[in-house]
Amino acid sequence: MLPGPVGWGGAGTLLLTSLAVMGSPGPVTISLTAVGSTWGVRRSARYLAGIITGTVAVLAAVAAGITAALLAVPGLRAALTVISVAYILLLAYHIATAPPVPAAPVAGSPPSLTGGMLLGIANPKAWLAISAVFTSARLAASPLTDAAAKTLALTLMVILICTAWLLAGASLAPLLRDPRRSRIMNITLAILLVGATAAAAVHQLRG
């Protein structure tokens, strides 16, 4: 049983901040939209699970108070950024060259669970964004209770936000029956994915 009561009055601020910061367009959210529109919800479920698992792992690191120590290790932030960018470029290529929606079930492979976990952990936006959200409100006087309550609330938000972006992408699928429109949309999403990743990477490396 957790020590000390939880004051859920501050949860509104925490959840609104998480929606604005964690739910905004970035490498992970745009990738989920692109993957959903290209492969659909069912075939993208493992990738979604991997993204959620990796992001929650970052959340757990923030809750445990080890994020600042990790980011202080020389070269670690740059290494995470390079890994994320490399995976995003590969993912963007597969999205841009994916077949039209009617052919998707029989051609091409959606990103894997492992790939999703890798991006969730190495996402250059996640570490600082989640840290900022985590400190935006206090839910309990006890540090342990506060961290546990925030972890629970933000884990639910991660699941909701990631699933919503995947569903948003999948909702575009019926519009992409035409091969020409499908190709334009896939290339557009791939470009947006690379652009969002480049912006996040530059910001993290400068920071």
Image: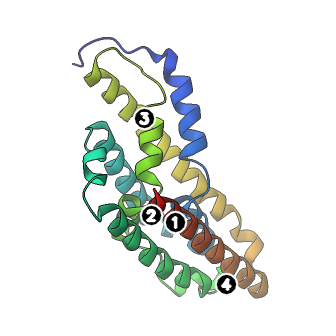
Q: Secondary structure at mark 4?
A: loop
Question: Mark 2 sits on what residue?
Answer: 205
**Quick check: 106 above or below 137?**
below
Q: Earlier in the sequence, mark 4 or mark 1?
A: 4
Label 2 – label 4 distance at C-alpha: 36 Å
From the top left corner, tell me how far across and down residue 196 is, in percent. Answer: 59, 66
Q: Earlier in the sequence, mark 2 or mark 3?
A: 3
Q: Earlier in the sequence, mark 3 or mark 4?
A: 4
Farthest residue in the top direction?
Answer: 5
Question: Mark 1 sits on what residue?
Answer: 202
- Nearest-to-viewer mark from 3 and 4: 3
* Three-letter amino acid code of the residue under disc 4: Pro
* Three-letter amino acid code of the residue under disc 3: Phe
Label 1 – label 2 distance at C-alpha: 5 Å
Q: How many marks?
A: 4
- The answer to the question of whether label 1 and label 2 lie on touching residues, with beta carbons closer than 8 A, is yes
From the top left corner, tell me how far across and down residue 132 is, in percent. Answer: 46, 39
Label 1 – label 3 distance at C-alpha: 23 Å
Looking at the picture, the colour scheme in use is: rainbow
Q: Secondary structure at mark 2?
A: helix
Question: Mark 3 sits on what residue?
Answer: 134
Q: Which residue: 57% across, 80% down?
A: 95
In which image quadrant can residue 141 be found? top left
- The answer to the question of whether label 1 and label 3 lie on touching residues, with beta carbons closer than 8 A, is no
